[in-house]
Amino acid sequence: MENKFAWIMTPNKPWDDKKEMITTALESGISYVLDLDDYDKIQKLGNVKIVANSDDADIYLVGINGEGDGSLILSEDLNQSQDLQEAKKAKREGKTVCAYVEITDKNHEQLAVSLGSVADYIILISTDWTVIPLENIIADLQKADVKIIAAVADEDGAKLAIETLEHGTDGVIFEANDFNQIKKIAQLVVDASKIKYDLKVATVTNVKPLGSGDRVCVDTTDMMKPGEGMLIGSYSKSLFLVHSESLESEYVSSRPFRVNAGPVQAYVMVPGNKTRYLSELVAGDEVLIVNTEGETRTAYVGRSKIERRPLILIEAEYEGKTIRTLLQNAETIRIVDADNNPLSVADIKIGDKVKVYVESNARHFGIAIDETIIEQ
């Protein structure tokens, strides 16, 4: 699943009021702003992407005139639409293009599909998606390299748009008029982007202390709770739930931002249902935090720390498949048992039941593919 996103349109308010709405959006994780008047001021508020009908904008907007009233420039002849010609010209000039189309009839729906084959983003506006079904346009553009954004009025509209069909729109855009609404829609988009993994219960078949190797601690910018960790393993399609260091120990203080993950060659699950090698992670990278129910959220790596430490091999079996991972051989390193309790590697024994994630597809460069690959 690709991450959903939200943009805002600035309200028709004095600059000081508008600025507060934009700041709230930025604090809520929304960094794309459609504005036709004050984009020079907006750029000073932070790392913002401006969507406007201007050569200075980050994303060049087609479909709204320069008057700032939101009216559309549409031709009666859709093949000669001024918007379509302008979008093609902007793309030839190397611009990132967003088309803005108000869907009022079948002709405008067809225009949206034509623009979607050219633009990088397309904003769709309709007063009633039950009259002009959103799923029609999503289906027509499913093979186009365009992000579909639905203009919505409130949280309910945002929920409808991102859940339409199996995938929904890629994003939503709304006028930022209310602080609470900005926060609610931002959170809705975050929740809609979450993947839930179907964790299985495997049986431990081997526990073997090894010599030293280079292991990776992943320190994130999030605080993890007991029951949360990361999916990690020696095989890209068979991963253990490795618990965070969010528990107190008689030996060391808790480090709730950390997962002591495993050796450098191990895989870790990251957003988009992809895996990466632990050795690749650097500050600023995204990783998935996963809880005992398989629910996920995205976090950023604050630091990846590689040190030489003694290792331990854990093998388990699920439906005839052998799953392996290596971890640091220390009492504070834990996986998760079938009852969702942390299980220290110092206490693991043959026959224990532990939480794992197993998928049928193999992976190539971290992406799941339908191909036979043997990992052992």
Image (cartoon, rainbow, N blue to C red):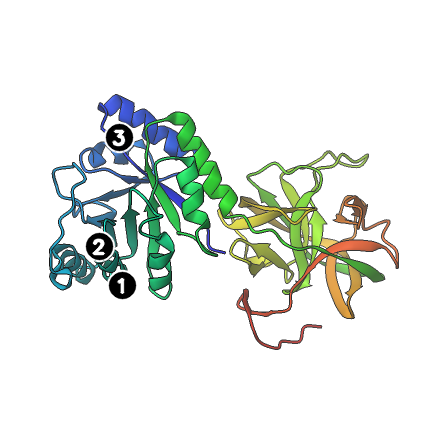
Q: Earlier in the sequence, mark 1 or mark 2?
A: 2
Q: Earlier in the sequence, mark 3 or mark 2?
A: 3
Identify residue type, mark 1: Ser
Q: Helix, strand, or loop for circle 3?
A: loop
Q: Helix, strand, or loop for circle 1?
A: loop
Give the CA distance from mark 1 to mark 2: 14 Å
Identify residue type, mark 2: His
Residue position marked by numbered label 3 in the rendering? 11
Q: Residue at x 22, y 36 (%)?
A: 39
How far across and how far down the image is residue 29, in percent? 42, 38
Closest to the observer, 207 or 204 = 204
Identify residue type, mark 3: Pro
Mark 3 neighbour class, 10 Å CA radius: few under 14, some 14 to 19, many 20 or more: some
Among all residues in the image, which is located at the extreme right?
350
Residue position marked by numbered label 1 in the rendering? 117
In this view of the protein, can residue 89 be seen by the observer?
yes
Closest to the observer, 26 or 331 = 26
Numbered tag placed on residue 72 in the rendering: none
Whether tag 1 and tag 3 are in contact, CB under 8 A, the answer is no
The quarter of the picture where residue 223 lies is: top right
Q: Residue at x 86, y 55 (%)?
A: 352
Whether tag 1 and tag 2 are in contact, CB under 8 A, the answer is no
How far across and how far down the image is residue 17, in percent? 28, 22
Residue position marked by numbered label 2 in the rendering? 108
In this view of the protein, can residue 209 be seen by the observer?
no
Give the CA distance from mark 1 to mark 3: 30 Å
Determine whether, in the image, residue 271 is placed left or right of residue 101. Answer: right
How far across and how far down the image is residue 93, in percent? 17, 59
Mark 2 neighbour class, 10 Å CA radius: few under 14, some 14 to 19, many 20 or more: some
Q: Earlier in the sequence, mark 1 or mark 3?
A: 3
Give the CA distance from mark 3 to mark 2: 25 Å
Q: Quadrant of the C terminus?
A: bottom right
